[in-house]
Amino acid sequence: MDKKLITGSEGFIGKNINGEIRVSRNVCDLTKYDDVLNLFKYHQPNTVIHCAAKHGSALEMNKNHSKYLEENILIDLNIIKACKEADVKNLMMLASITSFPENCSYPLKEEGFHSGKISDRFFGYAYSKSIVPNLCKAYQLDYNLNYKSILLGNVRRFACRQGDLTNCIGAGTCSDLS
């Protein structure tokens, strides 16, 4: 049986994804590697869908770039390293379209992801999320692991009030994980 662990399970995205093991910040501090590793070893999931992130209001993120950058990079590194060490077979990490360059043309395309400067408006958060696809790629190349990232676009609370994200996630699916 495929046992899925969802991080950020109390957040807007995470609460809309099905999984047997639901992890919120009240369950595990993802900034502490040993806590993350112990969580994965205890539950032994086959799949981790990593939705957790340090996120805040536009005003908050615009005033604390280093805080958002440091905490998100730490969380993402802890997740991917602990998945590898705990022998998690499948990992899906969420990135953000805020990581696209500020002058990127629409519709957004994968080849435009690293084609320019990230906006200073949400730089800390956006830059931390721009690392996620490359982090997954490095683990694929070095360790031949099924670790992938997905860029979520067009996710808006008012459009998704019914808990159905099928019309709100514009960049891909989790179907190729298993």
Image (cartoon, helix red, strand yellow):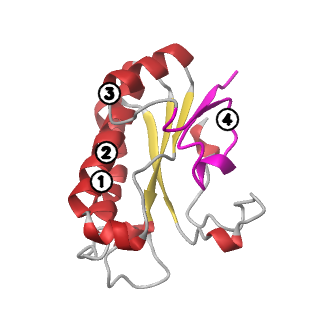
The Cα atoms of the two marked residues, 2 and 3, are separated by 17 Å
Residue situated in front as seen by the camera: 170 or 27: 27
Whether 75 is drawn above or below 43: the answer is below
| Residue linked to disc 2 | 135
- Which image quarter is the N terminus in? top right
- 47 or 175: nearer the eye? 47
Q: Position of residue 109 (x, y in %)?
A: 45, 73
| Residue marked by disc 4 | 19
The answer to whether the residues at label 4 and label 1 have Cβ atoms under 8 Å apart is no
Q: What is the secondary structure assignment of the residue under circle 4?
A: loop
Dot 2: what SS? Answer: helix
**Dominant secondary structure of the residues highlighted in magenta in the image:** loop
Which kind of residue does numbered mark 1 sit on? Ile
Q: CA distance from mark 1 to mark 3?
A: 18 Å
Q: Quadrant of residue 58?
A: bottom left
- Residues at badges 1 and 2 in contact (C-beta under 8 Å)? yes
Q: Is residue 50 magenta?
A: no
Q: How many marks?
A: 4
Q: Which residue is mark 3?
A: 33
Above or below, 75 against 94 in this view is: above
Q: Position of residue 86 (x, y in %)?
A: 42, 19
Q: Which callout, 4 or 3, points to the residue nearer the camera? A: 3
Residue at left offset 31%, top offset 38%: 77
In the rendered structure, the answer to whether residue 61 lies left or right of residue 152 reads left
Q: Earlier in the sequence, mark 1 or mark 3?
A: 3
Whether residue 87 appears in this view of the structure is no
Looking at the rendered structure, the kind of residue marked 2 is Leu
Mark 1 Cα shell of 10 Å, populated few (<14), some (14-19), many (≥20): some
- Residue range corresponding to the magenta coloring: 1-26
* Label 3 residue SS: helix
